[in-house]
Amino acid sequence: MFTSCKIVARRLKLKPSSFQSMCFGKYSTTVLKSAYGEVDVPDQTLSQFVWSSSSGWKNLPALTCGISGRSYTFGASENLCKVGAQAFLANTGLKPGDRIGLLLPNVPEYMVAVHAALQAGLIVTFANPLYTVPELTRQFQSAKVRCIITIPQLLEAAQTVSKTLANYDCTINIGGSAEPEQRILGLESLLSPSENVKLPEVRPSDIAVLLYSSGTTGIPKGVMLTHRNLVTNIIQLTDRALIDYSDPTDEFQETVLTVLPFFHIYGFNTILNYMTYIGAHLVTIPKFTPQDYIACLENHKPTVLFVVPSLLLLLITHPEVTPQHLSSVKKIFCGAAPMKKGLIDQFFKKIGRNDCTVSQGYGMTETSPSVTITPYTMPYSKSGSCGKLLPSTLARVIDLTDGKDVGMPNKSGELLVKGPQIMKGYLDNPKATSEAIDIDGWLHTGDVVYYDEDEYFYVVDRTKELIKVKGNQVSPTELESLILEMQGVADAAVIGIPDNVAGELPKAYVVKKPGFDSVTPEQVQEFVASKVATYKKLAAGVTFLDAIPRNSAGKILRNELKNLSS
């Protein structure tokens, strides 16, 4: 819409903003529409769509473990997914509509586990392997998980959690042995053909996955994404005006080194599903170490890297990473956190060439995840932008104080988006759903952005309170609740402190109860560390206050706390 106004305004020799005001009045809604048109979405499930293009490259590698060398071709992967779907229904006691939890690092079998489950009509939820037992328990109880798929190293945690789950059926141990008396099945239980089992009819409108996100505020909630949501977002990213990629041939195949976790929506749909759909070879690393990553750069010569800013910074600054290690890389995609122009400049200086495109986008779990992406033809002057709207995507930017549309470029406000990639809603939480998606279908992202005259978007800040540690979401509310469980703590507030490597680190402000003067910052840090994943630790420290600053409604004034820390 804004583009059309610009054209007419030029002809009338008026500023676009003035023309809009004349036409639509003070309270008009300024809807920005993608310049890339609309997408046609086939009536297919996610699995049907992902494998729909693979007939021409069945013998090419689809997934390879960068550490062990274990590898599966496209043909083998697709077949194992079908066999696994039949085995799920024949051997586990699960039935269509049941929910399973994946507690896995990035391994080639992730693809088989997910798509076998989806073809069996199951709903999948993903958990971070770094989660503690209490964190896993909360998520899997919320999702009503009846089966956990894991590996031997995480089996003990999976079994502990399983004892808390109602109507639990079994645990599947990838790479480990079966223990029938403990209801533990080996991987072979999913690889035994059961041709007499008829697979159910799965509809594109059915829920495919439950990904847990803190949304705009609060404790993590289950985001319900349908098959159609996920398929749509893949198609939106295949527009060749946005992303330049090559179809596989006998002579060439895109190779993607992926360490970003598949349990994250970015890793799951943008990497695992999208890259499989276009015929790329995914090289996985189960646990990131700089040494393993550098070795994979050297041994597999990837053409594509998916990164977060902290990983790109490592590639720039690590003394063992040379331009030669990166010589095969032609495309870099950055997500999960904004990448600044200065970091991009440092990367090009490192590699010493300009034939590599660095793209970044904007998205969230609730949008499957992508909303914008920088076109590969983007001019250098737009560096630092998170790109333009994907096809079939609408956006508005509203004023933070009065909620009215800002109606003009280069003015910041909260981003609202609408499109077929928007989630169905939050699991068992209609209140949170209605707070996120308004009556007109606009998703209120909680992120502060602006767009320029060419409708490139830029992330400025976020209204939501989430802390992003190396791309991982950390809920201040969750950490505050834990701190308040500690003896001697009267009140607590957590904020994110800027960090050059991690992006942000959690810091706590704590009020002691009378008579507990002996409580130390280290004790608070240790208490929290024993209950959370590593990235949620209070790595930026603990400071004691006489009182937590709050407004009249009791809401924590986090900006005041940030001023204290600056």
Image (cartoon, grey):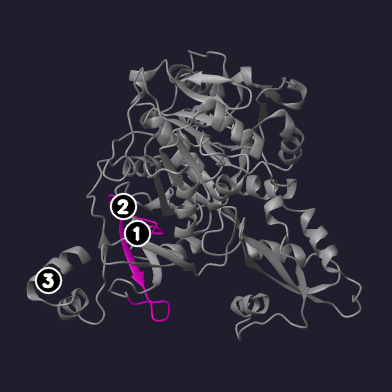
Above or below residue 39? Residue 436 is below
| x, y percent for residue 562 | 63, 75
Q: Quadrant of residue 499?
A: bottom right
Q: According to the image, label 2 marks what residue?
A: 378
Tags 2 and 3 touching, CB below 8 Å: no
Q: For the magenta stretch, what is the residue range?
A: 381-404
Q: Quadrant of residue 200?
A: top left
Left or right? Give the position of 16 relative to 493. left
Q: CA distance from mark 2 to mark 3?
A: 24 Å
Q: Secondary structure at mark 1?
A: helix
The amino acid beneath tag 2 is Met
How packed is label 1: few (under 14 Cα within 10 Å), some, or many (20 or more)? some
Q: According to the image, label 3 marks what residue?
A: 10
Most extreme residue toward the left is 11
Q: According to the image, label 1 marks what residue?
A: 382
**Across the whole image, how many numbered discs are drawn on residues?**
3
Residue at 32% across / 28% down in the picture? 247
**Does the stretch in magenta take in 69?**
no
